[in-house]
Image (cartoon, grey):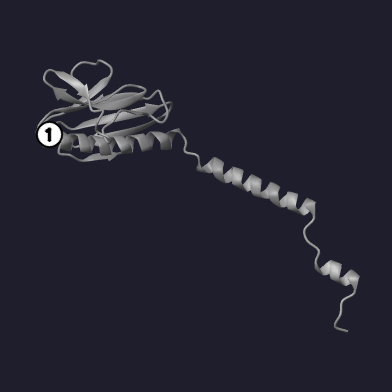
Amino acid sequence: MGSLTFHQASRAQRGFTLLELLVVLVIAGITLGIVSFNAMPGPQQNLKDDAQRIALLLQLARDEAIVRDRPIAFEADSEGYRFLQREEKTWQPLRADDMLRPRQFKRAPVTLLVFPPPDGNAMPLRIVFGREPVQQPFVLTLALADTSVAIRADGIGHFTVD
């Protein structure tokens, strides 16, 4: 009564068939594909990420200009941006500073507009932070295709991304 026949024992130990395993793998693959496709950032998110990074770096550059008692400039073109420090009568890139090092936009080319416009309309665009804690407010707009993001500076050291 307590023992199983050979036929009953083989049924109890039966596993999944190859077809059942393939169906599970296909379903898992489709689910993973949908999740990874939705997780990839689009142009709007890339532009917003760049703008948030730039806003933080502008804050840092402004503070550094005051602490170093030397003007620091933010310079950007359609491919990327960098920070410069005034040495004698020329602008020199800040290459040794890991935070203010040159960077590329995640997606390029990016159109840059600043309001009010700086002196002259030459590219690359340049915003200079002096030794004074109060500066002129400005709005820096980054645009890519049909999407744009604005960085607003209030002139007293606050930078926000819209």
Quarter that holds the C terminus: top left
Residue at image coords 65%, 46%: 29
Q: In which quarter of the image is residue 148?
A: top left
Vertical relation: 155 (above or below) 19: above
**Observer able to see residue 139:** yes
Mark 1: which secondary structure? helix
Q: In which quarter of the image is residue 123?
A: top left
Q: Looking at the image, how many numbered discs can be counted on the residues?
A: 1
The reply, left or right, for residue 45 in relation to residue 57 is: right
Q: Position of residue 146 (x, y in %)?
A: 43, 28
Label 1: few (<14), some or many (≥20) within 10 Å?
few
Q: In which quarter of the image is residue 16?
A: bottom right
**Observer able to see residue 153:** no
Quarter that holds the N terminus: bottom right
The reply, left or right, for residue 90 in relation to residue 108 is: left
Residue at image coords 45%, 33%: 43
Q: Position of residue 44 (x, y in %)?
A: 42, 35
Q: Where is residue 64 in the image (x, y as percent from the top left)?
A: 16, 36
Q: Which residue is nearer to you in this view: 75 or 141?
A: 75
The reply, left or right, for residue 110 in relation to residue 97 is: right
Q: Which amino acid does label 1 sit on?
A: Arg
- Tell me the residue that label 1 is attached to: 68
Vertical relation: 50 (above or below) 92: below
The reply, left or right, for residue 11 in relation to residue 120 is: right
Residue at image coords 31%, 29%: 141
